[in-house]
Amino acid sequence: MDKLLRGIQSQTIDLCIFDLVPSFVNMPFYFYYGNDTNDSDFMPAEQLRESFYTALLDFPILVGHLETDGSGHAKVVVDKDNLNIPEFLESQSSVHFRDLQAAQFSWDALPSGVNTVGAVTSADSSGVIKAANVHVVRLQDNSGIVLFISMAHYIADGVGYCAFINRWAELCRWIRSASATTEKPACHYNFERSSLFDKLPEGRKALDGPTLELITSTGPLVRWLAWISPKTRAILFRMSFNLMSVVSHVFHIPASRFASLRASVQGYLSSDVRLSDNDILTALLAMAIAQSEAECKQDSASASYISSLASYLFPSMYTPASNFVTQVVIDTRPRLKGLSAANYTGNSVLTRCLVNSMESLTSGIHEQSLAPIAKSVRQLVNGIDPQYIGQFVDTLHKDPLCFMCPATYAFSKTTMVLSNQSRFPLYEADFGDGIPRWVSPIQTFFPNFLSIMPAPPSTGGYVVYISMTERAMAKILQNKFWMSTSDMVY
């Protein structure tokens, strides 16, 4: 901590519109580490703590205070005399690692209170929004550690999140090694939001209608939500999501099963159309979620007070729809020359909408019906080039308050948000005693949010996290094609 206090410099980092769109969301994950060798020096507390504060010197944005002006502009102010130090907690649990492993790392087996924050970026008991929250839970008999790490999304996207975690792990290994007397490993991380805009081309390409609607449908509610403080907005979002009875499950698609599915789906398309894994996974999840939503809306739900209130506030969840919108989250780094090489850690993702008729998605899931949906995903992704990204940015900048449009989109549309995180280096976070055995998001997130995650290296395949209303999740668990393609982990 002393090195951090002495080394940090005051600065102001202006956030961009890409940071504001997900600014009400946290990125919270559990990392499970096992001590198989009964090493008494397993992930030692002092070095974990020291390397954490050392890593903050490389990520000064994490010790700054968020400031907004209510007009669609925000910044992080790092004041060396008034640092906003991230939460770093340590505790001892009576739960043994073997118990977690036997339960396949189910959330139900976790010690209570591991996650100190939830999905919504909120102020703590002192009224301050922390940019990061860490809880190190040492398990019984030093059998392992559960490491909870959450980062506010206005700070970074998943790439930036992983960059910090792996830098922390690298510094921990360095401090623990005999070479700790040598110079600290070199690194460079880019927090300047201008770096993103410098990579945009001169030309522009028109946005498609559904995506344009996603980011420009401003109204009184959107403008009010953009105007109020992040603290007040967090309270409202937490209340709203509590009304929806959101539940989550984690599924695993084995590599061999997915390879068979991919070959079958590809066989229904011409040889000039080559699908990616993401295309097929997106199509599969879109059909499964759309089918569950359609079935829920056909059911005659009981009119309890809560369900009536929820149906009034969120009519899209209860009113039959003719179309289903898949919001595909896309990282712009590979599409903007030089952005990845610049180690840009700010938010660099956009969302493009894929609209399919409910009829096409709910007629039955099988390899043949998946093929045209997967093809449409491929066409959508291929259409995102630098000129498209430039137009997306320009459109958002025309009205800074529209950063809240995507958050309210689901109030009127039957939709899902899909984030493919399967390339995130979550399983590279080695603090000196090996990589995590398992990594997962927290128990509940937002309704109709899905993420495709990497499986442990020894397992392969894909891990899929699905967060939905309890009613819709029940339909997913009854979907024969989905349940035959995947195995529910917990």
Image (cartoon, helix red, strand yellow):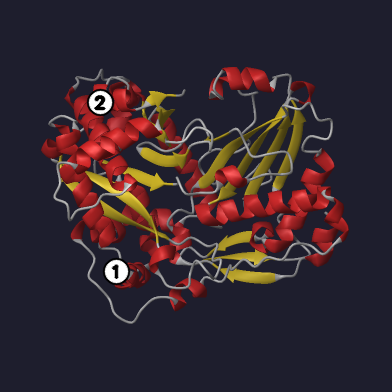
Q: At x 28% / y 42%, what residue is drawn?
A: 280
Please say whether residue 321 is visible from this viewpoint: no
- Label 1: how many Cα within 10 Å (few below 14, some 14–19, many 20+): some
Residue 324, above or below 273: above
Question: Quadrant of residue 400 in the image?
Answer: bottom left
Q: Nearer the viewer, mark 1 or mark 2?
A: 2
Q: At x 23% / y 46%, what residue is drawn?
A: 325
Q: At x 25% / y 53%, what residue is drawn?
A: 378
| Location of residue 193 in the rendering, given as x and y in whole percent from the top left corner | 52, 70
Q: Which residue is mark 1?
A: 388
Work out how far the residue at label 1 is from the one at label 2, CA to CA, in angstroms.
Answer: 35 Å
| Label total for image | 2
Q: Is residue 311 left or right of residue 98?
A: left
Q: Which residue is mark 2?
A: 481
Q: Secondary structure at mark 2?
A: helix
Q: At x 64% / y 45%, what residue is drawn?
A: 429
Task: Indicate which disc residue 51 carries.
Answer: none
Please say whether residue 121 is visible from this viewpoint: yes
| Location of residue 372 in the rendering, given as x and y in whole percent from the top left corner | 15, 45
| Location of residue 69 in the rendering, given as x and y in whole percent from the top left corner | 51, 65
Q: Nearer the viewer, residue 322 or 483?
A: 483
Q: Nearer the viewer, residue 173 or 418?
A: 173
Type of amino acid under label 1 = Tyr
Is disc 1 in contact with disc 2, using a CB cutoff of under 8 Å? Answer: no
Looking at the image, is mark 1 or mark 2 earlier in the sequence? 1
Q: Is residue 54 left or right of residue 238?
A: right
